[in-house]
Structures are given as structure tokens and as C-alpha cells.
């Protein structure tokens, strides 16, 4: 109800209606793009699983390139969403650091993966 009123006030003063969750929307600008780009990453990951980890997809595209592009899109959507919604960047970076460190610990605790890392460098 309050969000609808705010949208109406913005539409009155700005002169055009705003779509909630769109890039320029209110509330939560960029939410729909963040969801869309997250889904596109998931889609490519599904293709990688579907090919059994092969880089070449049946449609002739390179899945390493496609996942790289979609991760770039997702990073842009994340940063846009964080900035436009005034989220606490320090909190996000701190959580990122904790989680990344945990992933490294898990990775390094597995001798098979650790050895594979060494040979692939
Ligand atoms: Mg995309």
C-alpha cells in the first residue's frame, strides 16, 4: 500500500509511471535485472552439466565463453543493485571475504582437487 502510494507520488512528479523492480523502477531498482542475470548464469551452468563438463555445446557455442559473459552480466547487475538500493557495501565485502576463505579451506582440504589445481597451473 505504501509502495503503491510512493509510486503514484513519483509518477505524479516525474511525469511517468515507474515499474517496480525495473532498472529505473521503484522500489528496489534493478531487482528484476539481478534475477534475470542470475537465471542466465544458472541456464549456462545447466548446459555445462548437460554436456558432462564439455566446453563445446551442441549448438556450437563455447560454454566457457558463455559462462564468462553471463558472470560479467551478473556482476554488473549485482553492483548496480547494491549501489541503487544503498546496500551496505562494507557488510557485503566482509561476508564475501568470509565465504571466499571458507571455500578455499574446503578446496584445499580435498587432496584430489588440490593436486588437480597444481597440475593445471
Ligand atoms: Mg546475461
Image (cartoon, rainbow, N blue to C red):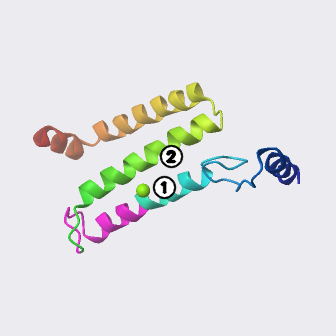
Image: magenta residue range: 42-58
Which tag, 1 or 2, sits closer to the chain's start?
A: 1
For label 2, the SS is helix
- Name the mark on residue 87: none
Q: Which residue has dot 2 on it?
A: 77
* Residue at (38% x, 46% y) in the render: 72
Q: Is residue 54 magenta?
A: yes
Inter-mark Cα distance, 1 to 2: 9 Å
Query: Residue drawn 60% across and 49% down?
Result: 23
Residue tagged 1: 38
Q: Is residue 119 left or right of residue 24?
A: left
Query: In the picture shown, does residue 68 fall above or below 108?
Result: below
Residue 100, by quadrant, is top left
Q: Secondary structure at mark 1?
A: helix
Give residue 90's quadrant in the image. Answer: top right
Q: Give the crowd class for mark 2: few <14, some 14-19, many >=20 residues within 10 Å.
A: many
Return the residue found at the far front.
15
The image quadrant where one finds the N terminus is bottom right
Amino acid at each position: 500500500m505504501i509502495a503503491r502510494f510512493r509510486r503514484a507520488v513519483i509518477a505524479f512528479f516525474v511525469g511517468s509511471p515507474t515499474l517496480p523492480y525495473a532498472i529505473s523502477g521503484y522500489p528496489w531498482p534493478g531487482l528484476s535485472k539481478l534475477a534475470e542475470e542470475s537465471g542466465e548464469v544458472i541456464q549456462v551452468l545447466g548446459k555445462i552439466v548437460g554436456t558432462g563438463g564439455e566446453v563445446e555445446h551442441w549448438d556450437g557455442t563455447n560454454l566457457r565463453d558463455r559462462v564468462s559473459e553471463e558472470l560479467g552480466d551478473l556482476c554488473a547487475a549485482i553492483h548496480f543493485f547494491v549501489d541503487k538500493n544503498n546496500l551496505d557495501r562494507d557488510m557485503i565485502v566482509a561476508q564475501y571475504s568470509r565465504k571466499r576463505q571458507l571455500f578455499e579451506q574446503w578446496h584445499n582440504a580435498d587432496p584430489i582437487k588440490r593436486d588437480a589445481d597444481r597440475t593445471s597451473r
